[in-house]
């Protein structure tokens, strides 16, 4: 990701952070219904191929890390009725599952027996359409937090996984919508 694009992503993320927190506790049903009916919300529904690139300079590990890419799948559905609330995200607009192994990066995002839960929140803003995702929220392992921008059938941004006195990692991610099966 170019320096200019990375700076733009960080600016959008920073400018919408307050909005995400404020909207996380919004009890306004009509506003939520409008958000879920919005093009950005509809666009996120479905299966996405996701890839994570590790930034060694922002990662903590006692062993050598694979700085290649890990890839997998994330599938989202609208959270129309459940209104999942996670401390890492606030009130989500989408929920789903994922299939990604972070073992090459030196950490695990969940125990083998845990369901690989994904929650997301979309936020339309004047600067663009922001996307926030948490893989394995509330886990005893390292939840992966993603923040970026979504445009068309792609999303780009930054991710991080960290815990007090534990390893973790950080870097960039890319998501691309998978074509619908016939």
Image (cartoon, rainbow, N blue to C red):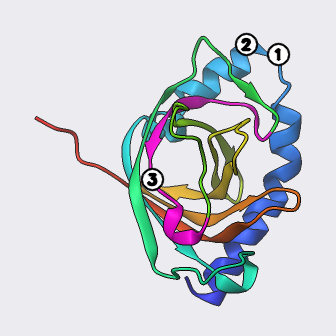
> Residue at label 1?
27
What percent of the width, then of the height, locates residue 168? 71, 65
Q: Which of these two is toward me, 44 or 31?
A: 44
Q: Residue at x 60, y 11 (%)?
A: 81
- Please give the range of residues in magenta: 88-106
First-in-chain label (1 vs 3): 1
Q: Residues within 10 Å of mark 3 (few under 14, many from 20)?
A: some
- Mark 2 falls on what kind of element? helix
Q: In which quadrant will I find the N terminus?
A: bottom right
Residue 29, numbered label: 2
Disc 1 vs disc 3: which is toward the camera? 3
Q: Which residue lies under the disc numbered 3?
A: 100
Q: Helix, strand, or loop for circle 1? A: loop
Task: Classify residue 35 as left or right of residue 48.
Answer: right
Q: CA distance from mark 1 to mark 2?
A: 6 Å
Give the structural element (helix, strand or loop) at label 3: loop
Contact flag, marks 1 and 2 (Cβ < 8 Å): yes
- Nearest the viewer among 6 and 52 is 52
Q: Is residue 70 above or below residue 110?
A: below
Labels 2 and 3: the sequence-earlier one: 2
């Amino acid at each position: 990701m170019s320096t200019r694009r990375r700076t733009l992503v960080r600016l959008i993320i920073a400018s919408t952070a307050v909005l995400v927190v404020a909207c996380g506790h919004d009890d306004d049903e009509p506003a939520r219904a409008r958000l879920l009916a919005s093009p950005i919300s509809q666009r996120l529904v479905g299966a996405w191929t996701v890839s994570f690139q590790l930034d060694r300079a922002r990662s903590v590990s006692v062993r050598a890390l694979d700085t290649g890419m890990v890839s997998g799948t994330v599938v989202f559905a609208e959270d129309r009725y459940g209104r999942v609330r996670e401390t890492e995200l606030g009130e989500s607009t989408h929920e789903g599952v994922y299939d990604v192994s972070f073992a090459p990066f030196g950490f695990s995002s969940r125990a083998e027996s845990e369901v690989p839960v994904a929650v997301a929140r979309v936020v339309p803003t004047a600067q663009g359409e922001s996307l926030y995702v948490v893989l394995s929220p509330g886990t005893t392992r390292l939840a992966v937090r993603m923040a970026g921008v979504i445009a068309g059938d792609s999303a780009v941004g930054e991710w991080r996984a960290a815990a007090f006195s534990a390893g973790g990692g950080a870097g960039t991610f890319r998501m691309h919508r998978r074509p619908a099966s016939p």
